[in-house]
Image (tube, grey):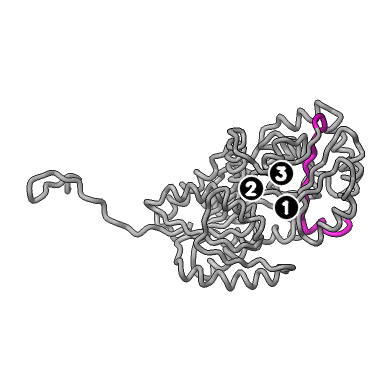
């Protein structure tokens, strides 16, 4: 057996250099603000492994204005920016443009693995284009399910289809892992990592606590309880959205509250919100906030009313009760532990549950003190390590 320390011709012992191997390439594809938030911790960890991995970032810009601030916050500079967002874009048009734009990116990069996150059109198209190109796929936040393909729409289809295409599945919770196994995914292909969104929110909250300016300046009245509201889901468009606004108007009549609603610019949302709530006392309708500013707002909230998947995770991680404006959720874990309640679109129920939190200190305390079920802030590190090991092993199929 050859010794690892061999004598040189001059007699000096030298350690030979290890054989050089080409780096594995990971193509990360994202297009919306939630994807950027939840993939940032993974990308930063992958780039710390630059001796073994080359990480290439492609943004589709499915949501242009909401995406760029997060990229700047985490200092993520894409090698490819497809800039696909169009005014009034439809799902069919966006999907068609995205698949066409991804093909030359995959040809140029020749990745060993494509990494996608969640359940957006970018997630699905990034996975499908990679599948067509013969590239293996890793899916972050895999296994979330409502088991209703129309709710949320089109996200439930996007994530279920991505499951069928992926080789690596990073489930945020045990329940999500079991959903994947029941769908036929080999258990050895599933890794329970926690949710990377918790990594991001804790990272930003720590920086805010250390004095990082958030950029948000609101005329918040001292002594009033702050209710933060977000809503943007397609299944809420139309009458459900109007009933939500009517419930908020009822809550705004209280003298002990102030309501801040960063209003999504979607034309199916903004006109209804402003027609019902503009000029109401105790209601601040503001432009969408950058991520750090929004986390700062959540930190100050008494509780949150939302239909957002990400806020269902962020709220409990910051100790904030969350009322969810949906009839179904793919994130049941926080409901099980008591940090979140589903209230749907019924204005009476929304007002009743909000009033309970405002008037019953024990109920507010109970929901606030419940430990978040979504992770410990180390998910990005775990996912990057699994990707490195997967590519290091040269596995073709799990």
**Which of the numbered marks, if any, corresponds to residue 176?**
2
Residue position marked by numbered label 1 in the rendering: 146
**In this view, the mark in front (2 or 3):** 3
**In this view, the mark in front (1 or 3):** 3
Highlighted magenta segment, given as a residue range: 222-239
**In this picture, residue 370 sits left or right of residue 42:** right
Badges 1 and 2: C-beta atoms under 8 Å apart? Answer: no
Q: Residue furthest left?
A: 10
Q: Looking at the image, which residue is at 48% across and 48% down?
A: 384
Q: What is the total number of numbered labels drawn onto the structure image?
A: 3
Q: Looking at the image, which residue is at 49% across and 68% down?
A: 106
Sequence-first tag of 2 and 3? 2
Question: Can residue 180 be seen here?
Answer: no
Q: Is residue 161 magenta?
A: no
Q: Looking at the image, which residue is at 63% across and 47% down?
A: 176
Whether residue 40 is situated above or below residue 159 in the rendered picture:
above
Q: CA distance from mark 1 to mark 3?
A: 15 Å
Q: Position of residue 203 (x, y in %)?
A: 57, 39
> Disc 2 on helix, strand or loop?
helix
**Which of the numbered marks, if any, corresponds to residue 112?**
none
Q: Position of residue 37 (x, y in %)?
A: 60, 49
Q: CA distance from mark 1 to mark 2?
A: 11 Å
Q: Position of residue 117 (x, y in %)?
A: 59, 55
Residue position marked by numbered label 3 in the rendering: 312
Q: Is residue 234 magenta?
A: yes
């Amino acid at each position: 057996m050859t010794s690892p320390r061999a004598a040189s011709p001059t007699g000096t012992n030298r350690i030979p250099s290890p054989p050089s191997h080409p780096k594995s390439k990971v193509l990360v594809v994202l297009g919306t603000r939630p994807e950027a938030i939840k993939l940032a911790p993974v990308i930063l960890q992958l780039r710390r492994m630059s001796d073994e991995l080359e990480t290439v970032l492609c943004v589709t810009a499915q949501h242009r204005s909401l995406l760029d601030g997060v990229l700047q916050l985490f200092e993520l500079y894409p090698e490819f920016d497809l800039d696909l967002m169009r005014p009034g874009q439809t799902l069919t048009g966006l999907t068609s443009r995205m698949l066409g734009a991804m093909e030359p990116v995959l040809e140029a990069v020749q990745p060993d693995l494509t990494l996608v996150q969640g359940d957006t059109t970018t997630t699905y198209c990034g996975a499908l284009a990679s599948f067509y190109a013969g590239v293996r796929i890793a899916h972050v936040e895999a296994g979330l399910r409502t088991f209703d393909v129309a709710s949320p729409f089109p996200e439930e289809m996007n994530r279920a289809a991505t499951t069928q295409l992926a080789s690596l599945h990073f489930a945020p919770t045990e329940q999500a892992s079991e959903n994947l196994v029941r769908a036929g995914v080999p258990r050895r292909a599933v890794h329970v990592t926690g949710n990377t969104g918790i990594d991001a929110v804790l990272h930003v909250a720590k920086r805010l606590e250390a004095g990082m300016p958030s950029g948000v300046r609101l005329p918040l009245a001292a002594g009033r309880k702050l209710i933060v509201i977000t809503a943007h889901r397609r299944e809420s468009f139309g009458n459900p959205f109007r009933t939500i606004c009517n419930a908020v108007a009822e809550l705004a009549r209280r003298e002990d509250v102030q309501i801040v609603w960063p209003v999504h610019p979607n034309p199916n949302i903004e006109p209804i919100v402003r027609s019902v709530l503009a000029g109401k006392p105790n209601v601040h309708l503001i432009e969408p906030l950058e991520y750090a500013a929004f986390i700062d707002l959540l930190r100050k909230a008494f509780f949150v009313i939302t239909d957002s998947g990400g806020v269902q995770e962020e709220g409990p991680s910051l100790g904030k009760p969350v009322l969810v404006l949906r009839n179904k959720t793919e994130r049941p874990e926080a409901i099980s532990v008591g940090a979140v309640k589903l209230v749907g679109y019924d204005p009476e129920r929304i007002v009743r549950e909000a009033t309970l939190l405002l008037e019953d200190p024990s109920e507010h305390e109970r929901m606030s003190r419940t430990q978040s079920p979504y992770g410990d802030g180390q998910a990005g590190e775990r996912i990057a390590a699994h990707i490195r090991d997967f590519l290091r092993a040269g596995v073709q199929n799990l």
